[in-house]
Amino acid sequence: MPHLSQAGNPRQLFLLTGLFQEELEHPQNPTRNHNSLQPLPLIPIHRPPPPRLPLSNPRPVPPSIHPPDYWQTGIPLNPAPLFDRRVKFTILDQAGQNAMRKVCRLAREVLDIAAAAIRPGITTDYIDEIVHKACLERDSYPSPLNYNHFPKSVCTSLNEVICHGIPDQRPLRSGDILNIDVTLYHGGYHGDVNETYYVGAATTNPESVRVVETARECLQKAIQLVKPGTLFRAYGEVIEAHARSKGCSVIRAFCGHGIHQVFHCLPNVPHYSGNKAVGRAEEGMCFTIEPMVAIGDWRERVWPDGWTAVTGDGGVTAQFEHTLLVTKDGVEVLTARLPGSPGGPVTCPVSVSPPNV
């Protein structure tokens, strides 16, 4: 999802894999000493343990896979402006809509495969390996890979990480909550979906359950509004009202976005109330809604890696996302869960307290 203040600007990573030459831990052969891997210096870490470095090498993509235009340079050749009101929203023809249906179905399959592997002890780097292989098996390119120089094939965001977490060698622990954000590029189109999952005994933590289930419900309530004519600013009103009723806050720095042949483009879809988003839904539009909800304050900080966004107060946060196609009478959820999809809702605690906003 684009950052509302920095969308479209290339991000420079100085924590690139080439700076480090250490053996990658594999979950089936955990011989490495985790204490030898030092976290990023001078970064306040509110919830242990910190990230584990170095990163593994970016995973190769065979020449048989058709890549997006940024796969070599890291910069989209024709970046779509995210804040130019003169730009018209894209309306997909039937062929484009069918292409979006296909790529989003593949994205759902890959997300489900990755989610099924979640358990204490594996690393998010291993999740990245699973996602990368599953994309290639579907003749698809993992869209995050080298997008504005992002070094991995999927975003994995733990606990206080809001979004854009870089897979690393930190083992998952029972009690964590993990967001996996998958995007595929197939047939010239991108499909984007994410969910937050409980690791081990995380469902016994009322705080974690409250934030995860609130984020899930916020997305569901927003999707119910999608139809031709609905203003893009309307979704944030419903999302924030529901989040506040559950004692949560809504992250404001990141938004939903248009998606089709371009990874991120107009329209912008903010998730908070009182936003000034321009435009309304029209039949044939594709865009994402992806609310990020926090237990504490909504303000964010971005680590020096240029990507990892965390809550400023260290509070846990959760996110859910679907890619949506506006139809004549309403909406088609292109990345909808399947009957066997891992995860799913659990009972949410009743007692809440208002957030500090």
Image: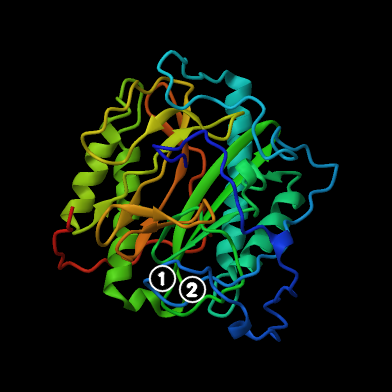
- Which image quadrant is residue 271 in? top left
Residue 68: x and y, percent? 70, 35
Residue 322: x and y, percent? 46, 43
Residue 6 in view in this figure: yes
In front here: 314 or 321?
314
Tell me the crowding category of disc 1: few under 14, some 14 to 19, or many 20 or more residues within 10 angstroms, Cα based: some
In front here: 2 or 100?
2
Residue 184: x and y, percent? 63, 44
Which residue type does callout 2 highlight?
Pro
Which residue extends farthest front?
42
CA–CA distance in space, label 2 to label 1: 6 Å
Residue 212: x and y, percent? 35, 61
Identified at 25% across, 61% down, the residue is: 296
Identified at 49% across, 22% down, the residue is: 284
Tell me the crowding category of disc 2: few under 14, some 14 to 19, or many 20 or more residues within 10 angstroms, Cα based: some
- Which image quadrant is residue 140 in? top right
The answer to whether mark 2 and mark 1 are in CB contact below 8 A is yes
Which residue type does callout 1 highlight?
Ile
Which element carries disc 1, helix, strand or loop?
loop
The answer to whether residue 306 is above or below residue 346 is: above
- Which image quadrant is residue 233 in? top left
The answer to whether residue 89 is above or below residue 155 is: above
In the picture, measured across the screen, residue 278 lies left or right of residue 177, that is left
The answer to whether residue 299 is above or below residue 208 is: above
Identified at 47% across, 35% down, the residue is: 7
Which element carries disc 2, helix, strand or loop?
loop
Which residue extends farthest right?
63
Q: Which residue is disc 2 drawn over? A: 50
Q: Which residue is disc 1 drawn over? A: 45
Residue 143 in view in this figure: no
Task: Give the number of marks.
Answer: 2
**Disc on the earlier residue, 2 or 1:** 1
